[in-house]
Amino acid sequence: MINIAKLRDKHAIVSLGNYQPVLQSILDFDYMIGRKRSSLVAIVTAGIHNQKLFFGTREILIPCAQDIKELKDLEIPPPDLFLNLNSGRRAKDSTKEFIEAFPKVLGGHIFAENVPEQHAIYLYQKFHDKHFIAGPSGVGLMLPGHLKLGAVGGTDWRQLVASKLYASGSVAVLSASGGMINELIRMVANGGNGCSFALTLGGDRFPITSPGEALLAAEADPQTKVILYYGELGGYDEYDIIELVKAGRVKKPIIAYIAGNVGEAFARPVQFGHAKALAARPPESASAKRRALKKAGVKVADSIASLADFVEALRGDILPKMPQRDPQQLSSRQPGLITTTISDEKEVYEFVGKSLEDWEKNHSLVEMIVAGLLGRPAHSKLLVQCSESIFKLALDHGPNVSGAVNTIVTARAGRDMVSSLSAGLLTIGPRYGGAGNDAARIWFDAVQSGMDAKELVESYAKNKRYILGIGHKKYNLSQPDPRVTRLLEFVKDLPERPYTDFAKAVVAITSSKKSNLILNFDGAFAAVLLDILQQSEKLKPREIAQLIDSEFFNAYFVIPRAVGFISHFLDQKRLDEGLFRLPDSQVTVIPTQKTD
Amino acid sequence: MARIPISEYRAKSLLLGSSYRGLSFRVKNSSARFSKLDPKGRYVLKVDQGIKKRHKQGLLAVDINPGAAPEYIKKFQAKGYEQYLIEPFLPHAAKDEKYLAVERLREGLQILYSRQGGVDIEDTGAVVEKVLYKGGPGELKKVAAALGLKAEFLETLTQRFNQLHMTFVEINPLVVQAGKPLLLDCAAQVDSAAAYFTDEWTLDDDTSSLNLSPAEKAVAELEANSASSFSLKLVNPDGALGMLLSGGGASVAIADEVCNLGQADNLLNYGEYSGNPTAEETKLYAIQVLNLLLASQAKTKALVIAGGVANFTDIKQTFKGVIQALGSKKKQLQQQRVKVFVRRGGPNEVEGLAMMRGFLEMNDLLGEVSGSDVILTKAVASAVEYVA
C-alpha cells in the first residue's frame, strides 16, 4: 500500500542500476525544490566506486556499491525507497534481495519492461502488504515539491520547470502509461493547477500497485482533491475501480480517459504499445470500460481534447509559486575535467581539508603525509607513529640493492636529479620494493575469506608460488630482522590483530621448513598497517580493499625510499667518480653456440 | 511484447508431451511428414497459425486420409497460409464435447468450463462457469467432476501452465470419453517476457509473426534487435493517414483521435517507437511507415508525426532519423502532395522541432509543426482537416 503523506518527508533513494539521465534528473529536481542534499544516496553498479552528478551547477559524488550486500558498508542514511533500473530478467530477484536486505524501506519503482507476468505477481503477493512498488515498466512516482522517483516528469530540467514540478497542487494523476503521465502532468500545469502526486502504474498486465490500490491511496491523501485516471484497453483492473466507487470507498471525484477505441477499428485483437494493451475478450475493450465507468458515475472523457477541458475546469492553487532555487543557472553548467578531494587553491592553499598554515603550525610532516595518503586526517596517533617508523626503517636498505645501484649508475652517467631518482624509482616492482602491497592483499584476502594459515601455505606450495612478505636473504629464525621486531611492537596493545596473527601463523609453518622463511619487512608492515587501519582507524573491509586496489601500501616504500635515492644521487655528485663501467671480471660471458 | 499466441501444434506438444500424435509442417516439408502417416488412417488437417474460427472459414479438413491432404493444402496455400497441422481423427459424439479455458489473473488462474462445448459455444447459449484457482485442491475437483474427468488431468494442466509461463489456454472442444480427456482443438498464449526462463518454447513460436505483411515483418525484426521498442500494424492499406507515433500510451490516445473524428476507415496504420531509439533505428522504422503511405491509393495523404511529452526519448536525435527517412523519399512525397503534421515534446524539444520545421519548409512538405504547448492530438485534427 502507498501512504502518500508519509512519502512527503521520506526520500532517501537507492538506485539499483546506473542510468545517468534519470539519476541526474532526480538531483535537478532536488536542487530546484531547495533540498540541501541529493535524495539519491547510493547507486548499486559494478565497476566504479563513485558516480559524478551535478547538484545544481556543482558536481558531487554519489557513492556506488558493487552489489546490494555492499550497500551496508557505505556510510549513507538508511534507504527509504529504491529505484530499480535493472533489466526485466533481473527485476524480480534484485527487488526481492533489496527489500529483504532493507525491510524498513517504504517501496520503490521497477523501470524495466519485459518482466514476466509470474514475476510481477510474485512480487505483488510477497510485498504489496507492507511496501509499494510502482511498475513494472512506466516511469515511477512524482510528488511535486517532494519526491522524484524515476524518469517521471522528464529527464531534462527544462521539462521539470515547464510542468511546475517544484510546486504541489491537488490533482492526483494515475496512469498506465509513462509517456502519458508526463502529458497529463503538463495538462494539469497548463490548466493552472498542480499535482498532489503522479504515479505510473506501468503498462504491464499486472501492475504491482494495482489501479484500485492507487485510487485508495489518492482517497487517503489529504492533499488530493481530484483524481485523474488514464487507462487503456486490455485487462480487467478498471472493473476494480468501479467496485471501489460503488462501495463508497473512493468518494473523491474521478476524471478518466480509457485509450484504445482505435482497437475496434481492427478485425482481430491487436497488441498495442503496452504489454497489457490487448483486448482479447469483450470486457477488455476501451469502449466497454468507458461505458462501465460512466455508469458508475466516473467522469469519462471521450477524447484527449475533452479531457483537457475537464482538467482546465479544475482551478486550484499551487505552492510554492516559484522554484526554491533558480533553475536557469543549470543551463550554463559544465562538468569538471578532473575531480579532486585532496586540495584546493581558491582562497588559501588547502590540503585535505586544512590550510597549509594550519598544517605547518600544528601538525608533523608524517601526519600530513598520512592525511594525504588516506584522503582524510588520521584518527589515531598509532597510525601516525607506526607510519613514521616505517618511513624511517624503509628510507635506505644499503647501496647494494637494485634501486640504489640504478640511481648511482645514472648519477655517474652525468644525469640530473630527477632522471637519477626516476631510474631508481622505476626499478621498484614485483621483485624489488613492491611486495608490501601484494603482501597486504594476501593477508587481507585470506583473513576476509576465513582461510587458515595451513590452507594458504598449501595452496601456494601446490601452485609453486612464493608468498610475498615472507623470506629474507640475510635474516633467519636464529637471527631475526630487528626492523620486523620493532614494527610488531606497534600492534601488541591492540585488542585484536587478525592480520598480524595470521602472518605469524603462516611463518610458524614456513620457517619450520626453512629457517629463513620468516616474516620480512614488507610482510610485517603490511600486516601491522592492516590491523591499525581496521582497529584504530575503523576502516571497513570494503575501504581497505579499495586501498589495496590503489596500491596504498606501496606508498610506504616509495615515499621514504625516494629520499634514500636522492641521498645517493647527491652523494655521487659529491664523489664525482665519472662514468661507471663494469670491469670485465664482473661480467660472465657465455659464447653463442655456433651451428656449423 | 507480451502475451503471444503459439500454434496449436506447439500448445498440444507442450501440454501433452510425447503422447501427442500430431505433426506440424509447412508445404516444403509436407511429403517427408506424410510418409510417417498411415495411408489408410483417418486424419484432420488444419491451418495452424493462430487463426480463429477456422471451421467457419473452411480452414479445416476433417476425417480425410493422407492421400487427400495435398489438394486441401493447395487450397489453403492459395489463401496465403503456410503452416499446417495434421493429427489423427477422433470420432466422438457431440454430447462428449466440453469447454475448458484457463487464464492467468492477478489473484490466481481463472478456469472457465462448460459441460457443453464445441465450435458453436457462443451461439448455443451453453452455460460457462467460472472458478478462481489459487492452488487449493477443491477448485480443481469441482471442475473435474463437472466435466467428468479425473482431477489429475487439471492438476497437470495447471502445473504445466505455470511452468511454461502460459497466460491463456482454451480447449474447445475438450472431448471426454470414459473419463479420458482428448484435446480436439487448443489455442494458447505464452508470456513473451518469460522466454528467457524456459527452454520449452521460444519467441519463434509466435504465430502472429506468420500473419504479418512485409512492412510489419521488417519492424518486428527491428524490434527484436533493438533495446528500444518498435511496433507497426497495418489497418487499411489505402488509408490516407500515415501514423509515425511515439510512446506506448500516447500513440494509442493519438490513434483514438482518428476514430473520434470519424476517420477510422482512413487510418493507414497504427504503431509506435519508444525507449530512446538511435537516429538510425528511427530512420529504418520511419521508412517502413513512409513505404506504406506512398503505396496507399488514397487521393490526399498526410503523415502524422506525434507523441506525448517524452520522459527520456531525445527528440532531436529521433527526429534526425525521421528527417533522414523523409529525405530519402522526398521526391515521391512531393509528387503525391503528402503533408506532414507534427506534435511532439520532450528532451531537446525546441532543437528537434526547429530542425523538423526547417526541413519540411524547405522541401514543401510542411503541414504543421507544434510542441508540447498544444494538445496531444492537435496534429491528428489538422491532418484530418487536410485529407478530408
Image (tube, grey):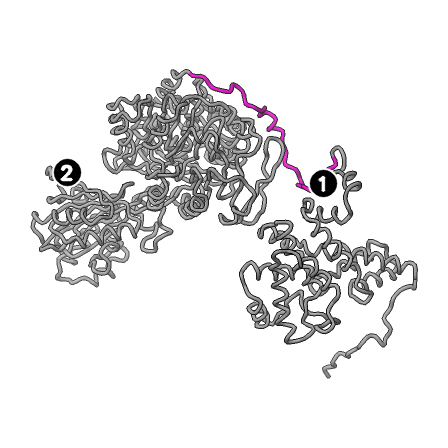
Q: Quadrant of the N terminus of chain A?
A: top left
Residue B122: give its label.
2
Amino acid carrying label 2: it is Glu
User: What residue sits 70% from the left and 52% below the top?
Assistant: A382
Coordinates of residue A588 in the picture (x, y in percent): 80, 77
Q: Chain of mark 1?
A: A
Coordinates of residue A371 in the picture (x, y in percent): 71, 46
Coordinates of residue B133 in the picture (x, y in percent): 22, 45
Q: Is residue A246 above or below residue B43?
A: above
User: What residue sits 39% from the left and 17% below the top?
Assistant: A314
Crowd class of label 1 (few under 14; some 14 to 19; many from 20; radius 10 Å): some
Q: Which residue does the numbered mark 1 point to in the structure image? A: A343
Which of B306 and A246 lies nearest the eye of the viewer? A246
User: What residue sits 42% from the left and 38% below the top?
Assistant: A107
User: What residue sits 59% from the left and 70% below the top?
Assistant: A457
Magenta span contains residue A89: no
Left or right, A163 with reference to B47: right
Left or right, A521 with reference to B49: right
Which of A195 and A392 lies nearest the eye of the viewer? A392
Looking at the rendering, the stretch of residues picked out in magenta corresponds to A316-345
Q: Is residue A264 above or below residue A111?
A: above
Magenta span contains residue A321: yes
Q: Quadrant of the C terminus of chain A?
A: bottom right
Per the image, label 1 sits on a secondary structure element best described as strand
Q: Separation of disc 2 and disc 1 at Cα?
A: 80 Å
Amino acid carrying label 1: it is Ser
Left or right, A405 with reference to B350: right
Most frequent secondary structure within the magenta stretch: loop
